[in-house]
Amino acid sequence: MLTFASYNRFYPRAVTINKEFKVGALIFSALIVLYFGIDFLKGADVFNPARTYFVHYKNVDGLTASNPVMLDGFQVGLVKKIRIVQGLESKVLVQLEINKEIIISKLGKAMLSNNGFLGGKMIVLDPGQGEQIAEGDTLIGSVIPGFTSMLEDKAQPMVNQVTHLVKTVDTLVASFHPTAAKLGETLESVRKLSDASTNLVRDSRSEVHEIAENLQKLSASLLEAEKQLQQLLAKTDKITDSLNKADIAGAVHSLHKSADQLNQTLSSINQGKGSLGKLVKSDSLYKNLNASSASLNSLLIDVKANPKRYVHFSLFGGKEKKQKSGAAPNK
């Protein structure tokens, strides 16, 4: 009976070939798994076929192979290769592998953009609308300003303003030197004035002491005046109480009553009532006074013209003459 051991003994060459075949198959399988595993780790979909497209950029700004190609936030491909093509304005040629299910038109765009805040890059795909582009054709390349670029654009005006401000401050500082010199002179003058004030205070110490004593005396006088004022206020309070207790309303009422009576009296006089009213309203008194005044003037004129008729002076027989002169006026 032929056993496995006897077979190996009689056919050693066959056993060696079988082992080599197994090792080779194992290595080949490992290489295949490694190849597809690397593509899978790079983000390639090894189970779905992809199309190849190209795009030109002036500057890829750190884009590397295996960076993703995104469509509406979903990865639909990756960057396969990047190489330099000299002699062209956009000399950076990027090879893209995009899922075969994605239909891209001739107006499709591949936009270079930042992938987060850490500086990564990605391609944002805009398929566009219209006639489909063939595999291997070139897409329109553009660049989306990243966060850093936007910060630079926003910060540039601020930097310009800061630069202008620094220049202005430099100019101000340069113009401040003469002012600083004047300020030093002013401070020196203030120091001298302070020294003079100190000397003045030292020299006037006795006068200040005297002023302080006068102020103390004035304070004592004010306290005394305050006491007198309090006494005066107490007396004023008493007077106020007396006025409050007085029948001021009655006095005012009496005054009003007297005023009414006076008004009634004046009204009666104006109306010609009573003796005083008749004197005021009637002109007979005025006429009598005028007549008496005229008679008196005539008498005075006559006395001046004929004084002997009214006055006699004699050392003898004065009584008889007086009687005769007394009789004359009767005539």
Image (cartoon, rainbow, N blue to C red):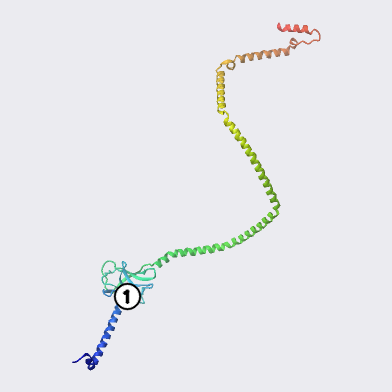
Left or right, 19 with reference to 205:
left
Say what secondary structure mark 1 lies in: helix
Tell me which corner region of the image, top left, top right, bottom left or bottom right, holds residue 21: bottom left
Q: Amino acid at mark 1?
A: Leu
Left or right, 303 with reference to 38:
right
Residue 301 locus on image (x, y percent): 70, 14
Residue in the image at 54% along x and 62% along y: 172
Left or right, 161 with reference to 208:
left
Residue 294 locus on image (x, y percent): 66, 14
Tell me which corner region of the image, top left, top right, bottom left or bottom right, holds residue 234: top right
Is residue 282 visible in this depiction of the protein?
Answer: no
Give the residue at the far left of this rendering: 1
Residue in the image at 65% along x and 57% along y: 194
Residue 228 locus on image (x, y percent): 65, 39
**Vertical placement of residue 135 versus 6, above or below:** above
Give the residue at the far right of this rendering: 316
Q: Would you name the residue on which mark 1 appears?
A: 41
Is residue 202 visible in this depiction of the protein?
Answer: yes
Label 1 environment density (alpha carbons within 10 Å; few <14, some 14–19, many ≥20): few
